[in-house]
């Protein structure tokens, strides 16, 4: 079987960088949820209390989700891969040329 460059996995450094970026984005969303919950609870009238509670729940749950995804290991290989090249052995033609024959 012949392997091609497209069969290679992403480098570990690239995978770690991807997971770090995803973690930081999740934690930034968590910080926004926390600030939104404070603003909705303090500055806005009673109808916004539900929004404050939902945002606070997001701020509590997102760190757990971020850590699970960051420590989950390498990303799975993409499904859009090329299949390895395997030559067909049954279609070989006989090589022409001189033949060893015993003549009389």
Image (tube, grey):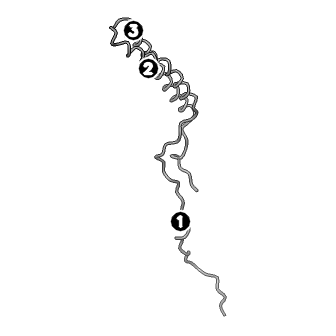
Name the residue tied to disc 1: 88
The image quadrant that residue 90 belongs to is: bottom right
Which structural element holds mark 3? Answer: helix
Quadrant housing the N terminus: bottom right
Name the residue tied to disc 3: 41
Where is residue 98 shown, x and y percent of the image? 59, 80
Give the CA distance from mark 3 to mark 2. Answer: 18 Å
Residue at horizontal 53 percent and vertical 36 percent from the top: 75
Decide which of tag 3 and tag 1 comes sooner along the chain. Answer: 3
Of badges 3 and 1, the one in the foreground is 3
Drawn side of residue 25 relative to residue 3, left or right: left
Residue nearest the viewer, comparing 23 with 58: 58
Give the CA distance from mark 3 to mark 1. Answer: 70 Å
Which structural element holds mark 2? Answer: helix
Decide which of tag 3 and tag 2 comes sooner along the chain. Answer: 2
Of badges 3 and 2, the one in the foreground is 3
Name the residue tied to disc 2: 29
Where is residue 73 shown, x and y percent of the image? 58, 33
Picture disc at residue 53: none
Within-10-Å neighbours for mark 3: few <14, some 14–19, many 20+: some
Residue nearest the viewer, comparing 71 with 56: 56
């Amino acid at each position: 079987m012949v392997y091609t460059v497209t069969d290679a996995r992403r480098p570990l450094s690239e995978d770690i960088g991807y997971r770090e970026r995803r973690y930081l984005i999740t934690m930034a969303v968590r910080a926004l949820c926390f600030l939104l919950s404070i603003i909705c609870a303090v500055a806005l009238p009673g109808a916004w209390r539900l929004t404050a509670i939902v945002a606070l729940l997001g701020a509590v749950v997102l760190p757990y989700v971020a850590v699970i995804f960051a420590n989950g290991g390498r990303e799975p290989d993409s499904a859009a891969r090329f299949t390895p090249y395997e030559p067909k052995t049954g279609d070989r033609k006989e090589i022409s040329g001189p033949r060893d024959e015993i003549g009389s």
